[in-house]
Amino acid sequence: PPRLSVERGIFPKLGRNGRLALLFSVLTGLLSHGYHLFRYPLYLTDEGIYMQRAWSLVRETRLSPYTYDYDHAPAGWITLAGWAFPLPKQFETFGNAINTGRFLMLLVHLGAVVLLFEVTRRLSGSVLAATIAAFFFNLSPIAVYYQRQVLLDNLMMFWLLLALYALLRRETTIRSAFAGGAALGIALITKENALFFAPTFMYLLYRRIQGSPSHRFTRALWPFAAAAPVGAYVTYALLKNELMPSGLDFDLANPPADHVSLLYTLWWQIHRSQGSLLNHHGLLYTSWLPRDAFLLLAGMATMVISLWWGMRKKRRDLGFFVAGTLAFGYSFYLLRGSVVLDFYITPLIPIFAMNIGMVTDRLLRRPALRRLLGRMSSKVRIAVPAMLAVLLLASPSTGYLLTVNTEGRVAVADQYQSKLALTHMQQAQIAWVRKHVSPKARIIMDDDMWGELHDVHPFYPYAHSHWNASSDPALRDKLFRKRWQNVDYIIMSNKMRNSIHRNNGDGRENWILAALRNSERVWADIRGGIRLEIYRVNK
């Protein structure tokens, strides 16, 4: 009988060596992502937003402390709220709200390691391929940077890997089909860009149930289970009369004034554009390649190889086809020209790692390579990728374990540098506010410190982000009245000044910029390219 058949659910048993490799991968992920977790990197604006909304669910039973405008489906921060609610100190259990969310991200990562390992092994039939995939997923600098952060993308990928694992059971039962569909549906209402993975899932389901006695029922049950969470989200908007814009007016130049709309927001997001990622000022060259050029370039190359091996007519390989099309679908999403933020690369990391692992394993089995190395034993097949892993970890140019610092010296990479406690700068900023600023002060800030100022006594009920202060009518027109004289302090996070200018295309933040011009700096902490400041407005 065949050793591997993805269509028929014939997979090699995990075995003792496989269990040891899986345990090693999980422990590696625990070390690489758990060490320095609360110190690196800086707390991100989006981390603050998602924890802010989780806080609102627990404290106020609302999806947001502000007007919920359907910018993202809510399953992500519902998960965060469900995690924080039973903890002893809830959002302050691990020091502050974002730390509490980051600990959940660590647990999510470890679960994703197990799923990625098993999915890769079942698509390729190789423990070596699964181990290589887990290696990059655990140790890639770009993975460590983004997967520590409280991001919807990390939660979405966990559900997608779970959905893929459910479709790769030995038997595609009604239970596994329902579980796989439901997991995909939860991924969709966690982050909408999970939609770009859905075509591969549907094709895999079709190949798995082809010829099955229950194929008709399973073919209908899986999409029903996937659509159920999405349908619940749409029903929520419908019951609140927020599904359609008023008068069915989808004019992007004139947003609906009387109430928010789910479909209008989706229409607006579809038409957002920022140009190509391939220009020299895009995220590809300024952020992603500098963090881990090896993973991205090797991932792109192995994606093309996977597509070629998976689509050949004479020997169509379903495992490589699934891995290649998953990477291609999301790469298309990133390159299509819409607005892309730097952490949007996160879902591509495990998929590229999967392709690298599978292609590397297949190449080491090629007859030409066997002839080159003589009678290649299993030890040689393990030694070759092991040597590559050692080179990646030992070379300062990769940033996997070592790096070249600003002084030109070889040092431990930023993600493992114990002296590089970036978040302590933000904690010092908050400490100054608590010591010198009245809780009644009207404050403009970023979202990363929202939880600290609203969930820890003394509370700062009038501290709001510049995003909400300039867009939410309750804040803009009632609390601040669009007058810079009504602002007492401006707490500047790193690169917040640039965010204000980018968000001010229509002049909505002119009054905040005027407050900044009429203020004096009373506190600052500047280290390298990181700049945190506090300004007191002079009236």
Image: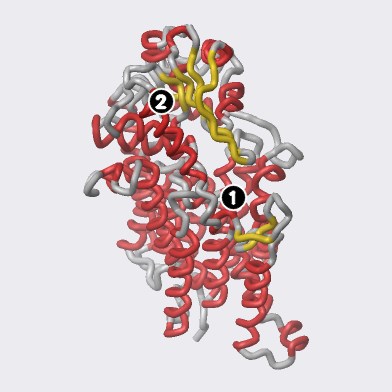
Q: Which residue is mark 1?
A: 329
Does residue 264 appear in the picture of this structure?
no
Q: CA distance from mark 1 to mark 2?
A: 28 Å
Q: Secondary structure at mark 1?
A: helix
Q: Position of residue 5 (x, y in %)?
A: 51, 75
Q: Name the kind of residue labelled 1 in the image.
A: Gly
- Residue 346 seen in render: yes
Res 527 → quadrant:
top right
| Amino acid marked by disc 2 | Asp
> Does residue 421 appear to the left or right of 235 in the view shown?
right
- Image height check: is 222 above or below 124? above
Q: Is residue 3 left or right of residue 108?
A: right
Q: Residue at x 38, y 71 (%)?
A: 171
The residue nearer to you, when weighing 525 against 136, is: 525
Residue at coordinates 63% horizontally, 39% vertically from top-left? Answer: 529
Q: Secondary structure at mark 2?
A: loop
Question: Which of the two residues, 250 or 61, is positioned nearer the viewer here?
Answer: 61
Provide the residue designation for mark 2.
69
Q: Residue 25: x, y in percent?
A: 48, 70
Counting from the top left corner in percent of width and height, residue 38 is at: 43, 50
Q: Quadrant of residue 353?
A: bottom right
Circle 2 Cα neighbour tier, 10 Å, few/some/many (<14 / 14–19 / ≥20): some
Write the residue at 38% across / 52% down. Answer: 103
Q: With 450 as the anchor, is 402 left or right in this view?
A: right
| Residue 532 vs residue 272, the one in the foreground | 532
| Farthest bottom residue in view | 375
Question: What sort of colour scheme is used for the picture?
Answer: secondary structure
In the image, taking residue 518 as reference, residue 71 lies left or right, namely left
